[in-house]
Image (cartoon, grey):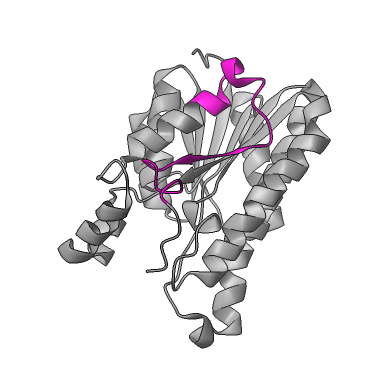
Amino acid sequence: MDFTGQTAIITGGAGALGSATAKQLASLGANIVVADRNMDAAKALADELPAAIAFEIDTSSPEQNQACVDAAIKEFGSVDIFLANAGIAINTPVLDITPDQWQQVLDINLSGVFYGCQAAAKVMAEKGYGRLIMMSSVNGLKGINGRAPYAAAKGGLDALTRLMAVELGPKGITVNAVAPGPVDTEIARAMQTAEIRQQWMEHIPAHRYGTPEEIAAAVTFLASKEAGFINGVTIPVDGGFVGAGIVME
């Protein structure tokens, strides 16, 4: 795979999955826009890459998504790949979720993804080529306690992926989603005790957590020209987690 001359915007680019993807795409020649609300982390990552800029963004804002696309065009001349990776999560039972919590998660994890993909797609449609990739989750495919707004948003992304693939496919744009299962990140390690991690691993046929690099590898392939006939699908990258059935806890 060769991404020389292509430009990728990655929202949530300074996080574990975003930074792993940025590094993989950059190693294959892509220009990178690290878009994140943590500007210090975004700048630090951009400084590590051969051709990259950092952009501070609140992805729930349509205007800031458009400004990010404009910045990419100004710096690199195009937008070829857009990874909608930014997201937040809460772990709260259905009966305790407040309207503000519900709305905040949907604003970032669903509406913000749409705004970013829409802004990028308008540029891609003009030149007849593009790759839109949404970071979904197995939470949109399985019932897991405490994650109602997160699951609703990710399920919405899967539906949006199919719809946008149908509309944008004739314009040379593929639209796909990656649904990570449990991934070994600093946040996951901080939130889970050793006992909880062991319980989760027992539900994963691979009997381990995934790595950010494994998620990035799936994204990188979907972003490539070689993946041009893959369109409108959500691909679990989960060690068989979805295939193992429902996990309620």
Name the image quarter holding residue 13: top left
Res 196 quadrant in image: bottom left
Image height of 230 relative to 249, above or below: above
Coordinates of residue 149 in the picture (x, y in percent): 56, 69
Query: Which residue does the image show at 43% across and 24% down from the upper left?
Result: 26
Residue 19 visible to the viewer = yes
- Report the residue at 67% width, 59% height from top: 111
Question: Image height check: is 95 above or below 195?
Answer: below
Q: Is residue 241 magenta?
A: yes
Q: Residue at x 49, y 41 (%)?
A: 236
Q: Position of residue 187 (x, y in %)?
A: 30, 58
Image quarter of residue 243: top left
Image coordinates for residue 207, horizontal then vertical, percent: 25, 45
Left or right: where 219 falls relative to 185: right
Q: Which residues are magenta?
A: 221-244
Q: Is residue 146 above or below residue 173?
A: below
Is residue 186 visible in the rendered structure shown here? Answer: no
Give 226 or 112, whichever is nearer the viewer.
226
Locate residue 233, reporting x and y percent: 63, 37
- Rendered view: 130 above or below 69: above
243 left or right, relative to 193 = right
Question: In what quadrant of the picture does the C terminus appear?
Answer: bottom left
Is residue 248 a member of the stretch shown in magenta?
no
Q: Residue furthest left?
A: 194
Q: Quick one: 30 or 142, which is closer to the camera?
A: 142
Foreground of the two, 246 or 17: 246
